[in-house]
Amino acid sequence: SQELEQSPQSLIVQEGKNLTINCTSSKTLYGLYWYKQKYGEGLIFLMMLQKGGEEKSHEKITAKLDEKKQQSSLHITASQPSHAGIYLCGADPPGGYNKLIFGAGTRLAVHP
Amino acid sequence: DSGVTQTPKHLITATGQRVTLRCSPRSGDLSVYWYQQSLDQGLQFLIHYYNGEERAKGNILERFSAQQFPDLHSELNLSSLELGDSALYFCASSPYVSGNTIYFGEGSWLTVV
């Protein structure tokens, strides 16, 4: 079965610093989703990537999917306290149906 | 606000009991998904319904069942509850059966005591 591994598990950065979170799949990714979650709250959709080499940006967050479609990165530029939370990558397994599997998440803290 | 509504937000119940969690998808969305999030298991897919029909099953226990009604709202029934069932249960919805963004509700916190 497909597994998603996220790194690092947790991250503490100073406000204004850049950071990168990685998501690696054991199999080819057919759809890669990034979500953000505040503890105990719902998941907020950030971005979806489908094509190898695809890159999307929203405000200060950029997500990329590598050419082989087995790794994705989420990059935050000039981090702010509002970026703090848990970042989860999710992926469509082969088969076409939306039963997303998720990585364990990366906990981000941004200190002023 | 994702547009996905879940009730109740919090629920405390005793072992052996049965509860029903309710989900209203975003307007126009035909797919509904249920996920369970616990500290030790992370976010786990339970089940997917599309336009009233079950389309995919994940790690859903036999004590759990779900359905999607003609008005597209969905219910997740959890019975013979055990302490280990304590978790945050999410409902999510999307317009079609696959290949599109899934939007999550705020979740229902279930505590089994």
Image (cartoon, coloured by chain):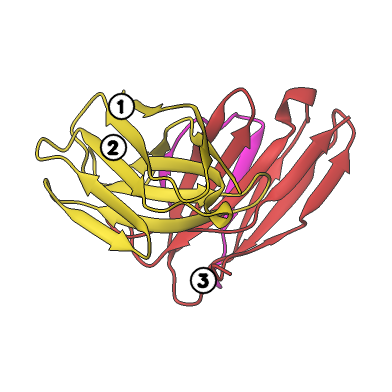
Q: Chain of mark 1?
A: A
Q: Disc 2 marks which residue?
A: A93
Q: Are callouts 3 and 2 both on one chain?
A: no
Q: Chain of mark 2?
A: A
Q: Which mark is residue B86?
A: none
On the picture, is A65 further left or further right than B73?
A: left
Chain identifier, red in the render: B
Q: Residue flagged by tag 3: what amino acid is it? A: Arg
Q: Residue flagged by tag 2: what amino acid is it? A: Pro
Q: Is residue B102 visible?
A: no
Residue A106 x, y percent position in the rendering: 48, 34
Up the image or down, B111 lies above or below B93; here it is above
Task: Give the residue drawn at x 64%, y 36%.
Answer: B64
Q: Was residue B66 drawn as part of the magenta stretch in this picture?
A: yes
Q: Residue flagged by tag 1: what amino acid is it? A: Gln
Calculate the distance from the C-alpha at mark 1 to the C-alpha at mark 3.
29 Å
Within 10 angstroms of label 1, few (less than 14), some, or many (20 or more) residues? some
Q: Is residue A35 visible?
A: yes
Element on which disc 3 rests: loop
Total numbered labels: 3
Depth check, front residue: B41 or A78: A78
Q: Disc 1 marks which residue?
A: A2
Calculate the distance from the C-alpha at mark 3 to the C-alpha at mark 2.
24 Å
Depth check, front residue: A82 or B6: A82
Element on which disc 1 rests: loop
Calculate the distance from the C-alpha at mark 1 to the C-alpha at mark 2.
7 Å
**Chain A rendering hue:** yellow
Q: Are marks 1 and 2 in contact (CB under 8 Å)?
A: yes
